[in-house]
Amino acid sequence: MATPLATLAQLISTGVQTLEAAYAKQGIPYPSLDAPFQPTPLDFDPALFQTAHLIIAAASQLIATVRSPMETIQAYAASMHTTSTLGFVVDADIPDVLKDAGPKGMHVKDLAAVNGIDADNQGTNFKSRSLIVAPNTFANNRISSLLIKAKSLDEIKADPEAKYDGAPIAAIAASTQASGYLSEFLRNPGNDVSPFNTAFKTQKTMWEWREETHNVWRARRFAVGMKGGGDVFPANIFTDGIGGEKLPADALVVDVGGSIGSVTPETRQSLSPPTKEITEGEKFWAESAPELIESGRVKLQVHNFFEPQPVKDAAMYFMRVVIHDWPDVTAKEIMANTRKAGGKESKLVLFDLVMPYACETPGAPPVPSPLLPNLGIAGAGFVTNLDIEMMTVFNGKERTVDQFRALGEATGWKLEEVKPGMLFAFVFSAV
Ligand SMILES: C[S@@+](CC[C@H](N)C(=O)[O-])C[C@H]1O[C@@H](n2cnc3c(N)ncnc32)[C@H](O)[C@@H]1O
């Protein structure tokens, strides 16, 4: 019988053959890491996505098995520096400078001269990045090319506050903060609401804090990132999630905590009450679907979801990635407010991620041994990181299906259906 190590190697090798065969069938080479990102017709093939994730799960498990535990701990202990370096690279517009330099890349001194950073300080650090093409010379690769912003360097210089507009991946990658205070926060419960509050020396929630004048650029960057989420998630997640095809054309649908309302155009029949992001929302709607605003079919309203919900008896209240921002006690307040406003027939739909168990659970899809049932970094890795991010910034969390059900039970909502996908849809009916 093959050993666990040999089985992992076999999973990788079989997976690689599957990927290469699929690309060969299309007559295209498998994308190289060295060249900037170019879309291929196979990028969103669900079967290949699954194959790639099995390879990633097996490769990371193989690394964890063969690397000395000491080296693994050293790597994890220092991995926050990767995050902060990523934030710096994006903020300093380095992928944008490299784009203009072309495939031959740019020497670190010239790179520094273009964007005003200190070459002597940065040179050594840059050396470790995978985009190196010669000593001290860098070019974009498949990964960094995705961080290029939508604006030219001249446009960025002219209006730095708007530099993330149109570049959701860069906006999200740059929004890193506060993680260094996680341990202090967890060891001193009650001192601060979240590590974010300790880091930025504020009692406000991140949402209130970023409305301060000096943080307007952060709010704008965040809105771009959230809109990007809408672009990345296929529209049918939302229409299927709210049962859009079954709703009468005049059904009232409320997007609670809807930011600029970027989910709403996908549903084409919603009313979106965001917070102060309303100005950005108005701009967004004027560009994307002005006719729906003019006809009154979509209304933007400012609403604090800790206050009574003003839209009564709607067919549907929905929230996209809102509940994971809050601890249980606050999440219940938000959900209870929708319940008080709703009628007997109203539904609540929560679009959120799900925290899978790392052990085997009934009904979960089978995974080849010896991989972890949650596929480790290939599966639960993202949601685990996001869970810690939510705790860091808001004292929020990602939840298991059972935890969502319990939130509903505490607030008068019965969990009726869970629709799996890139974002899960939790459909609740009124009790
Ligand atoms: C993670 S974002 C999700 C936004 C939107 N649902 C989406 O998917 O693009 C959470 C949103 O909650 C909003 N929010 C925070 N506190 C709020 C409050 N008290 N009332 C209403 N919205 C609030 C924030 O402004 C932010 O837009």
Image: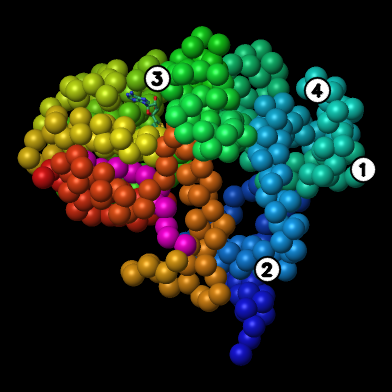
Residue for badge 4: 117
Residue for badge 1: 135
- Counting residues from the start of the chain, the first of labels 2 and 1 encountered is 2
Which residue is at the far left?
344
- Separation of disc 3 and disc 4 at Cα? 33 Å
- Separation of disc 2 and disc 4 at Cα? 40 Å
Above or below — where is 59 with respect to 249? Answer: below
Residue for badge 3: 277
Q: Position of residue 10 (x, y in %)?
A: 64, 78
Numbered mark located on residue 65 in the image: 2
Q: Nearer the viewer, residue 259 or 410?
A: 410
- On whether ligand 1 comes within 8 Å of the CB at mark 3, the answer is yes
Q: Regarding mark 3 in the picture, which secondary structure is present there?
A: loop
Residue at 56%, 75% in the rendered image: 370
| Pointers 2 and 1 in contact (C-beta within 8 Å) | no
Magenta-highlighted residues: 348-358
- Separation of disc 3 and disc 1 at Cα? 46 Å
Q: Please name which of the two marks, 2 or 3, marks the residue nearer to the observer.
A: 2
- For badge 4, the amino acid type reads Ile
Which residue is at the far top?
213
Residue at 70%, 30% in the rendered image: 88
- Separation of disc 4 and disc 1 at Cα? 19 Å
